[in-house]
Image (cartoon, rainbow, N blue to C red):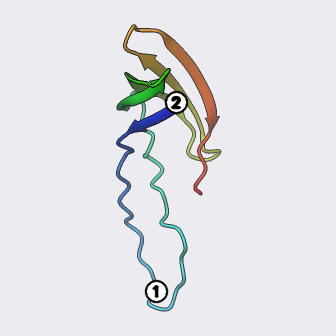
Amino acid sequence: MKWTGKSPICKSKGVREVNETITKTPVPSDVFFFNSLWKGFYEYLGKRQPATLMVDWFNTTSSKVNATFIEASNIQLKLSGEFRIR
């Protein structure tokens, strides 16, 4: 399955020193706020299908997230995982 759609936009509020080397921008703890919806498409058998990803729960300390993947025909898949920055 291939997901396409807009990801949430993260804006960093952190202050950096001039000589500080940072390879990754810190992600705000509210990037996965409760009941947030990400609309997009997934590809199945060569066709794009509309779908929504709804965040049900997010733990800022452990970065664990529970979400529901909702397809156009209202089939729902409950997902659970851990958010990681690559």
Q: Quadrant of the C terminus?
A: bottom right
User: Which residue is at a point 39% across and 29% down the rendered structure image?
Assistant: 41
Residue 84 against residue 17 in the figure, above or below: above
Q: Position of residue 39 (x, y in %)?
A: 34, 30
Q: Residue furthest toward the front?
A: 46
Q: Which residue is mark 1?
A: 17
Is 86 placed above or below 44 here?
Answer: below
Q: Is residue 4 left or right of residue 67?
A: left
- Quadrant in which the N terminus appears: top right
- The answer to whether residue 66 is left or right of residue 25 is right
Sequence-earlier tag: 2 or 1: 1
33 or 86: which is nearer to us?
86
Label 2 vs label 1: CA separation?
Answer: 34 Å
Q: Amino acid at mark 2?
A: Trp
Q: Quadrant of residue 74?
A: top left
Describe the element under mark 1 as helix, strand or loop.
loop
Q: Position of residue 56 (x, y in %)?
A: 49, 26
Q: Quadrant of residue 7?
A: top left
Nearer to me, 29 or 80: 80
Which residue is depicted at the point 59% across and 25% down?
A: 79
Residue 54 shows up from this direction = no
Q: Where does residue 67 sit, x and y in percent of width and height?
A: 52, 27
- What is the residue that sits farthest to the bottom in this orientation? 19
Task: Say what amino acid the circle numbered 1 marks.
Answer: Glu
Q: How many marks?
A: 2
Badge 2 element: strand
Specify the label residue 71 is tagged with: none
Judging by the rendered image, the residue that carries numbered circle 2 is 57
- Front residue of this view, candidates 43 and 59: 43
